[in-house]
Amino acid sequence: MGVTVKCKKTGRELDMGYIGFKRWRDKIAELYGGEWWEHYKTLDDAPFSDFRGQRTEFFKAFDWKTEQLIKDKKADIKIVDFCLQCDGEGSINYGACKNILKAIGNYTDDQAYGYAARADHDWERLKTILQDCVDTKSKLVWM
C-alpha cells in the first residue's frame, strides 16, 4: 500500500510509500524555503495524542500561522495546498505544478522517493511528471 503520483493526461506515474511521499513534500517545502519551510517543518513536532487538547491547540495555532503567511504573501497558497493535502488522495492544478517546478529549480538528488527496489531516478521522474502536467495543462493526482 502506498501512493501513486501521476499526471492525469499523460498517465506518467511513480509509486512510492507514504514516507517517500512525505519526504518529497518536505523537500519541496524546504526548497521553496523562507518562513513557509520554517513553519511547515514544525509539523514533525505535532503531539501524537490529544492529551489535554494539546494536539488540537497545536493545529489551531499551525492553521492560524499558515493563514497569516498566505495573507502576508510569505507563502504561495498553491505550494501550501500541495503540502497540506491528505496523503491518501489529492490533486493540484497545473499552475501549482508550475510553481513547484519554479521553487525546486535545477535541484536534483539521488534520494529514493519511490520504492527503493526500482531503478528509475525518482527525483528526475517526479520533475518530469510535474512538467507533463504543466505542458498538458493537466492535474497532478495522487492516490
Image: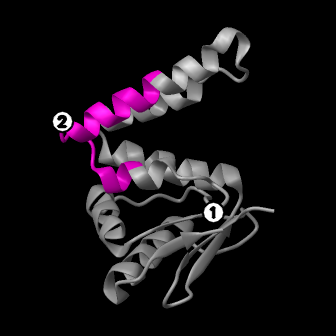
The N terminus lies in quadrant: bottom right
Relative to 53, is 93 above or below?
below
Please provide percent x and percent y for residue 46.
59, 24
SS of the residue under disc 1: loop
Relative to 129, is 61 above or below?
above
Report the side of 135 relative to 15 (left or right): left
The C terminus lies in quadrant: bottom right
Please provide percent x and percent y for residue 49.
73, 21
Q: Taking the image as drawn, is residue 34 in sight?
A: no
Report the side of 43 relative to 3 (left or right): left
Q: Which residue is nearer to you in this view: 57 or 15?
A: 57
Report the side of 28 relative to 74 (left or right): right
Residue 104 magenta: no
Relative to 118, is 52 above or below?
above
Q: What residue type is labelled 2?
A: Asp
Identity of the residue drawn at 67% across and 58% down: 88
Please provide percent x and percent y for residue 66.
36, 34
Secondary structure of the magenta portion, mostly? helix
Q: Which amino acid does label 1 sit on?
A: Glu
